[in-house]
Image: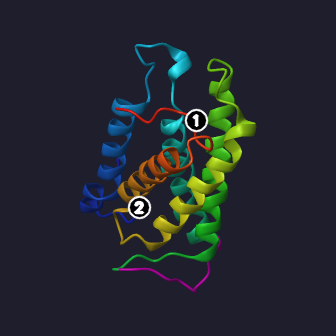
Amino acid sequence: MGSRSGVPRELLQGTLYYSIVMVLMTFFWFYVPSTGIDNANPTALLIIGCVSGGDGLVDIIGRKFGGEKKFGIKGSEKTIIGSISMLVGSILISSILVLIFSLEVSHFNIITLVLPIIVVNIVATVVEALSPKGIDNFTIFLAVIIVILIIELAFPDFWPYSFSF
């Protein structure tokens, strides 16, 4: 296993955070509750969509098509086209995952979830764009959780799923 830059030390940053995020997400949200699949929560699907689908495309698309104009904080180098790919990739992967899981979980309805998916992914995209170098996997994960928690508490009809550990 290597790193993007070829420097092994890089593995202790983004790749390690990605692994930790996936373990936490699986442990807390990617399961069938003891009360049954009817109480399942799509939080994990949005986390996967943002961290894997969206952030996975940022570097690839940003490097290839981003051009010379870059922005960022504390050493990060972001591009507008990279951020657009984050948003599009996140929405696409999150939506595909919801559609796939809706075959088993009837209340995972893409029609009712499309607006929450877009809102969560817009926030995740902004957080990714503003994250310092190497920690965006972790900040995106936290942003998705915080946004969903705020939406659930403030607008329960907008996110009608129980956000529990």
Q: Identify the residue under disc 2.
A: 4
Vertical placement of 10 versus 29: above or below? below
Classified by dominant secondary structure, the portion drawn in magenta counts as loop
Q: Identify the residue under disc 1.
A: 160
Going by the image, does 112 lie left or right of 3? right
Residue 2 visible (yes or no)? no
Residue shown at 58% from the left, 35% from the top:
160
Residue shown at 47% from the left, 52% from the top:
150
Going by the image, does 80 lie left or right of 153? right
Vertical placement of 85 versus 35: above or below? below
Instruction: For mark 1, give the secondary structure.
Output: loop
Q: Give neighbour class at mark 2: few <14, some 14-19, many 20+ (Cα, 10 Å).
A: few
Query: In the picture, which quadrant includes the C terminus?
Result: top left
Q: Which residue type does callout 1 highlight?
A: Pro
Q: Which residue type does callout 2 highlight?
A: Arg
Residue shown at 58% from the left, 85% from the top:
68
Between residues 14 and 37, which one lies in front from this camera angle?
A: 37
Residue shown at 69% from the left, 49% from the top:
115
Percent of width and height locating residue 64 = 61, 69
Which quadrant holds residue 66? bottom right
The answer to whether the residue labelled 1 contacts the one labelled 2, judged by CB atoms less than 8 Å apart, is no
Span highlighted in magenta in the image: 65-73
Q: Give neighbour class at mark 1: few <14, some 14-19, many 20+ (Cα, 10 Å).
A: some
Instruction: For mark 2, give the secondary structure.
Output: loop
Q: CA distance from mark 1 to mark 2?
A: 39 Å
Vertical placement of 22 versus 58: above or below? above
